[in-house]
Each structure stands twice: as structure tokens, then as C-alpha cells.
Amino acid sequence: MTKAMIEAVRPILDRPFFYELFDVLIGANYARSVLVREYIRPKDTDRILDIGCGSGNMLPFLPKCKYLGVDANESYIASARRRYGDRGEFICGRVSHQKVEQFGTFDVALAVGLVHHLGDSEALDLFRLGFEALRPGGRLISHDICYTPDQSALERYLLSHDRGQFVRNQSRYLELARSCFRQVTPNLRKDLLRLPYTHLIMECIR
């Protein structure tokens, strides 16, 4: 796939139908099930904030809980409300410090596939927002594609042409997370998608 073809595909994935079809093709539902089962480990009593929730595709894998999804894409939020409005609340907009105060505190905050779309200053702000949104002992779980020294040329090519323009190595992701959270546990996974992608999952505890 050429760079021009990749650039042409990116706007199409902003539409919920095509984004969800792409998700199915690459096996993203398996990745979500692993993320929930092994890393999020939610309880029925948890209050969960999903930052950059997209079309709400994490919700079917979560137990009955108090869920709030926030995303800036109006089409994604409309799709989420239509499909999962009976399971959670969805807000269109960006998460700000003022909104976090209005939302109250959460047991778990999610940033799934988000940090590699953000420059350093925005990523730092995201971790600050996540910290502020959590009760003491609460956890932020992030999940992003990641460079590693042992990757093939094909994988590095795919990562470098992802829609997210700020793919980092593990050290840089950890540096950003640890600017706000003292306890950050990293987990590298190479088995979550049908594509040869490496993911870094971080569990950040307030």
C-alpha cells in the first residue's frame, strides 16, 4: 500500500461504518476482550470514563457499570448513542479540566488507541486529566501502538503510516505517563491484531 493510498483511506475511517468494518477485519474485538479481561479487570460497581471512546466499541466487553464515553467526533458519538445508549452515557466534545470537575471521580479511566494521536503537550495534558478524574487508587489504562527495536521493516512501515502521527517507543510513552503517575506498569503485546502490530498497554495507578 502506497503512502497516497494510506492518506486516501484515513478520512474514510472517520465514518463509523467503515471504521467498524476495518475493526472487524483486523481482529480488534479480540484485542478489546484481552484488554478488558487481563488489564482493565472491571467490577460491576466501577465508574468508568472512556476518553476518546469512538463509537463506544469497548462497552460490549465491559460488565454492567456506570460508563461515560467522550469523543470529539460527532458521527462516532451519534453511532454510540444509537447502539449503546441504554448501557452508558456519551458526550460529544473534548475532555477538559473543567469538564473533569463536572464529571466527578472515576474508578477507571480508559485511553484506548489515543495517545499515539496526540503530540507531547496534548499527551501530557491527557495524563493530567486522567489523574484528576480518578479517585485515589483509581487506574488509567492506555493502549497504543509502539515501536520496538526488533520489529520487521513491514511492521515499522505500517506503524509509521498509521492514522496516529505520534507513535513512540516504550520509553517515551512511560516518560509521559510518569510525569503524572508514580506507579506505571508497562506491558508489550504482539498478539492482539491480525496485523503485525506491537501494542503497549500501561496501567497507571493514582
Image (tube, rainbow, N blue to C red):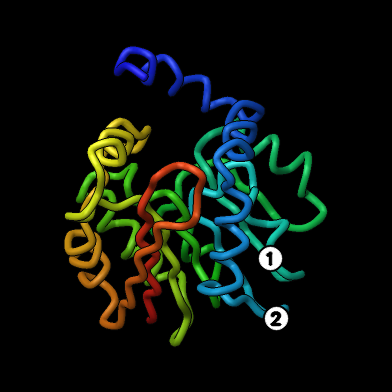
- Could you tell whether 43 is left or right of 167 in the image? right
Upstream in sequence: badge 2 or badge 1 = 2
- Could you tell whether 2 is left or right of 86 in the image? left
Compared with residue 180, is residue 153 higher up or lower down, i.e. above or below?
A: above
Q: Quadrant of the N terminus?
A: top left
Label 2 crowd (10 A; few <14 / some 14-19 / many >=20): few
Label 1 crowd (10 A; few <14 / some 14-19 / many >=20): many
| Whole-percent x, y for residue 149 in the image | 17, 55
- Could you tell whether 62 is left or right of 50 in the image? right
Q: Residue at x 32, y 47 (%)?
A: 116
Q: Residue at x 51, y 73 (%)?
A: 39
Q: Nearer the viewer, mark 2 or mark 1?
A: 1
- Could you tell whether 138 is left or right of 92 in the image? left
Q: Residue at x 40, y 57 (%)?
A: 190
Q: Quadrant of the C terminus?
A: bottom left
Q: Hey, what amino acid is under mark 2?
A: Thr
Q: Look at mark 2 in the image and give the residue it sits on.
A: 45
Find residue 16 and report its image quarter.
top right
| Whole-percent x, y for residue 133 in the image | 45, 69
- Tell which of 69 and 152 is nearer to you: 152
Q: From this viewpoint, which residue is outermost toward the right? A: 86
Q: Hey, what amino acid is under mark 1?
A: Leu
| Whole-percent x, y for residue 101 in the image | 47, 66
Find residue 148 and report its image quarter.
bottom left
Mark 2: which secondary structure? loop
Q: Look at mark 1 in the image and give the residue it sits on.
A: 62
| Whole-percent x, y for residue 196 in the image | 39, 45
Q: Residue at x 59, y 25 (%)?
A: 15
- Tell which of 206 and 115 is nearer to you: 115
Mark 1: which secondary structure? loop
Q: CA distance from mark 2 to mark 1?
A: 11 Å
